[in-house]
Structures are given as C-alpha cells and as structure tokens.
Amino acid sequence: MTVSEFAASTGPADVVRRQYLASAAGDLAALRATLAPDVEWTEMAGFPLAGTYRTPEGVTANVMEKLGQDWDGWAAHDDTYVVDGENVVVLARYTAANKATGKPVAVRVAHHFVVRGGLIVRFEQFVDTALVRDAMTD
C-alpha cells in the first residue's frame, strides 16, 4: 500500500494506526480527523483521566493535552493488532516520566476501538492503573 492509499484507507486497522501515528507526532488535528463527531472515548476507572469523553475536541483536550501537561514523553507504542470486522484490539505499551515525581512508567495496555465509516466511534482502555498511579506518587 502506498502512503496516499494508507492515508485514504477506511480499513479499521489503518484508521487506528493513523490515530497512533498522529498521537506520536503530537498532531492533534490529524488525530481528531480519525474520530467520529459522536466518538465515545473511555479512559479506564482508576486511570488519572478516568471517564468517557465525547467529540474529537473533547478527547484531545481532556486526554491528549492533559497527558502532555502531566507527563514527559507520553507515548503509546502500538505493538499488535487483532482485527474482527469493525473491532480493532491493540496490545500496546505506555512509556513516559511523570513531571511532578520524575518517575518513569512502562506499562502494558490493551485498547479496543470500534471503527465505522472510516472513523473511530468508540475507544476503551484497559491498563494496570496501579503502575501509572505509582509513578505519580512520591
């Protein structure tokens, strides 16, 4: 697949991969372009940003921008994709250092995306929240 074919692809895994690439580049406009207007983005209970956010702007303002405020080098490394129709499960890793404590975090994570019409309509995070919180406390 060429770069332009990848950029235009509505395949669920390609849409999700573009979301990770945009996030890694800090390109919030490109990230928002992967999200449906009525997206439901759920950060796991116990995670510092726990809750469900709606709209592309709501997701980037309440998740990505806040992660950037509290963590140095926050990154989600997408390692393995499992695709079943519109469902994409990504086994990944988060790495970062907490700005307040200086402590690093390296934690495995699973993300479940639902992609319809070439846009992410739903996201749910699964992560060991205790490891994230440990990095946030002295």
Image (cartoon, rainbow, N blue to C red):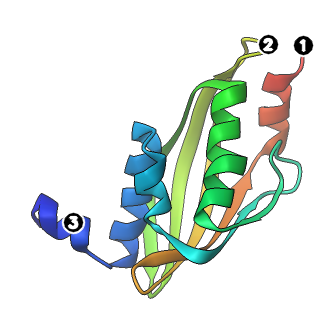
Q: Is residue 136 left or right of residue 98?
A: right
- The residue located at (15%, 69%) in the rendering is 5
Q: Name the quarter where the N terminus is drawn.
A: bottom left
Question: Which of the two discs, 1 and 3, sits closer to the camera?
Answer: 3
Residue carrying label 3: 6
Q: Nearer the viewer, residue 85 or 71?
A: 71
Q: CA distance from mark 2 to mark 3?
A: 39 Å
Q: CA distance from mark 2 to mark 1?
A: 6 Å
Identify the secondary structure beneath mark 1.
loop
Mark toward the start of the polypeptide (1 vs 3): 3
Dot 1 amino acid type: Asp
Dot 2 amino acid type: Thr
In the figure, 114 relative to 106: above or below? below
User: Which label number is shown at residue 101?
Assistant: 2
- Residue 14, image quadrant: bottom left
Q: Mark 1: give few (<14), some (14-19) or many (20+) Cα within 10 Å.
A: few
Dot 3 amino acid type: Phe
Q: CA distance from mark 1 to mark 3?
A: 44 Å
- The residue located at (71%, 58%) in the rendering is 126
Residue 106 at least partly seen: no
Q: Mark 2: give few (<14), some (14-19) or many (20+) Cα within 10 Å.
A: some
Q: Name the quarter where the C terminus is drawn.
A: top right
Mark toward the start of the polypeptide (2 vs 1): 2
- Residue 83, image quadrant: bottom left
Residue carrying label 1: 138
* Residue reaching furthest to the left: 2
- Residue 11, image quadrant: bottom left
Q: Is residue 119 left or right of residue 74?
A: left
Identify the secondary structure beneath mark 3.
helix
Cβ atoms under marks 2 and 1 closer than 8 Å: yes
Give percent across and percent down for residue 68.
63, 31
